[in-house]
Amino acid sequence: MPPTEPPPLPTEAELEVLQVLWERGPSTVRDVHDRLIESRKVRYTTALKLMQNLSAKGLVRRNDSQRSHVFESAVERSAIEARLVERFVDGVFKGSTGRLVLRALATRPASTEELGEIRRIARRMDEEDG
Amino acid sequence: MTYVLEALGWGVLHGAWIAPVLVGAGALMLAALRGAHPGVRHGIALAVLAAVAAVPWIVGGYVYFEYAEHLDWVARNAAGHSAAELHALHSGMYSPVLSGPSASALAALAVGAALLWLSVSCRGLVVLAGESFALKRVVRALTDCGDEGRRGLLESLRHTLAVRRPVRLAVSPGLPVPMVSGVRRPVVLLPAGPAAPPDEAANAPELAHVRRGDVLTNLLQRLVEVTTSFNPARAWLSRRIERERELATDLLACRALPGPRSEYVRALMALEERRPQEDGLRLSLHGNGDLVGRVRALAYPARRRPPALRVALLAAGLMCACRLLGDHVVRPAVRGSVELVMERDLSTRIDEASRLTPGRDSRARTTTPPPPPAQPPPAATMNVPPADGAGATAVTAVTTRDAPRPSAAREAEPTRRRRRTGFGGGPPDHFQLRAPSMAQWLQRPPSARDHGSTRSAGGPERLAFTHLPLRAVRLDSARDPPAPGHPPPKGSVCVYLTWHERQGTEGHGPDQVAPGRGRAPQQSGDCPGPRQHHAGLHEHERENRGRQPPQHVHQLRRHPSLPWSRASSIQDSISSRSWSLSLPDDASSSASTA
């Protein structure tokens, strides 16, 4: 059996909808819209379109058994987060993206010799500072 | 739009060499400030980067507005010219020493450079916008840190560093090292799991970045980089900016921590040790000395303050160098290509006429045989004396009201036609207008401009020097006048016109304006000399008008090394007026060399 293709990653707006579903569980479009409108101005039709897109991507499931369609997330939050972070980190440390983020350490890790020298410098600093 | 593109293209092309000069000056300044706070060096490097980014716009704007008058002239005279002629005139602005296809090629080169630069910049901006959206998506996807202890450490450090804005703390197991993002709502991204930082010292660099506003400056730096991606000097400057930013951040973070300096160093080292390796092994070849350099800068700060005198001298030297560069390299390089728009059209002819017309200047006569005695004299001749002590060419604005000489007479004087400037064209021996005025002559299509002359039906013939022909006068006195017998160097115009001031162009009769009239010598033997003649003009002017003669002409000639800025202001003052040179109706009373 061939491995199944992972669903495509959501856009930022779709991710916002997914987060509502992750927090609330199965929800109607009205529920999601009420939550989204708390943070920014968004139309009901926009929320509906976003959820339809998510459904088409296979990221949410739609339950048609009731009069109001209920949507629920079809993917785990950690899985989406891990895929997004993995792609982002690849870009950051391979130089293709990540120019807008400030890192604590350089792209290339320090060598063992450099770590040894840093230890020596730290010891000398301790001696100087008493 | 094409003009804008051309001007921008010249800005880009000039920026290719101006930017390395700026970066070199910035490198000298940074070297002189080795002992200063890294934040100071970071600011200087950012200022240099801003200057580099502004070069195409400044130079392009300078070029564009510099020939605004020319564009206006073209617009006003478009009816009399074909599109090809207007394009040739316009293209000629940038190629004073070239003509025809070469001029058009240069204009096309400028447009091509502008289009290439715009396309590369737009692509870079699109890519950067994509990165921004991707980063926002990742930040949104990350979960907030639920560890109250870690949040408390962050808040404590935020209070210590006086960071006013709330800082979100997000964690993810996929992050290898701590990061910070967000201009308006800063977010510290922390690794979770094995790579998690051990204590509050690990958050210090991120909060120090927020405190210093590095996220915003980094964003601006990236924006500038996409518009200057063609320049390798800028790449060096970007790396230097990042290095100085890290040093300044380390210094701030280290001071914010209560413990000894080594605590911060060990925190950095812990982060490095916990960083996941691609192959699970730490290879010796991977190091680039970045972290060691940061730790060394913390451990052995340059305690010696930079000598103020050295820095002051360096700054003064750089300012002088920039001034000289601007006066003698940048401005001529830009301006010189602009001002010579009429060179081939008018100035060369004036120049040629000035050389070929027997003036009173002995140097001019050495290369120009005297005219045949039977030849009628020019109606008016205005000689400009040479610059002090320099071998200036006698420059003469000549017009005659005589009929053009027959071709046989020209052939009989081959030496006159031998003198050709480097600007091409075969100018006539005399600059003779077949028009009542030079302004009208200029307004004709180039194909209709002949060089004969007509006598006015009555009254004096008048040459109205509006600002347009005056722009043909290159006030490039920084260049030495060419030696007699040699064509002027490329890029210079050895035409120095002088005339007495006459505001307005109408209503001046010969009794009011007669350059040299009654004072100019009739024979070269008793010629009082160009200077005296010129002075006589002024005296005449003073007597008749009760005004001081225009001093700027004197200034121009007296200072061969006149800087461009001064020459520019003089030229602006001249160009903003209308000048008229009325010619006497009686040729026998005019200045002449017959």
Image (cartoon, rainbow, N blue to C red):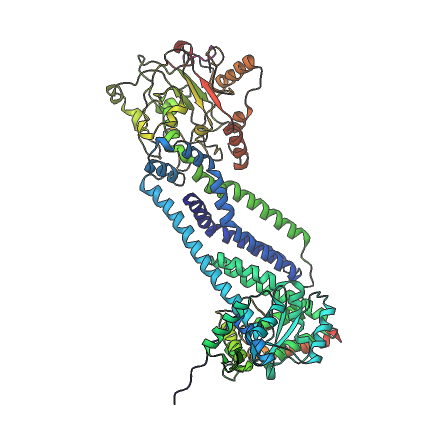
Residue lying furthest bottom: A1
Q: Can residue B325 be seen?
A: yes
Q: Is residue B59 above or below residue B160?
A: above
Say if B551 sits above or below B34 in the image: above
Q: Is residue B495 above or below residue A76?
A: above
Give coordinates of residue A67: x percent, y percent: 52, 78
What span is in magenta?
A: B516-527
Please tell me which residue lies in front, B117 or B547.
B117
Residue B498: say if magenta.
Answer: no
Q: Position of residue B89 (x, y in %)?
A: 37, 36
Instruction: Tell me which secondary structure the magenta stretch mostly adopts.
Output: loop
Q: Residue furthest left?
A: B408
- Given residues B566 and B130, the one toward you in this image is B130
Residue B566 horizontal/vertical position (percent): 55, 34
Total residue callouts: 0
Please determine whether, in this image, residue A34 is positioned above or below residue B389: below
Res B175 seen here: no
Q: Which quadrant of the figure has residue B436?
A: top left
For the point 40% across and 23% down, the residue is B438
Residue A58 lies left or right of residue B410; in this view the side is: right
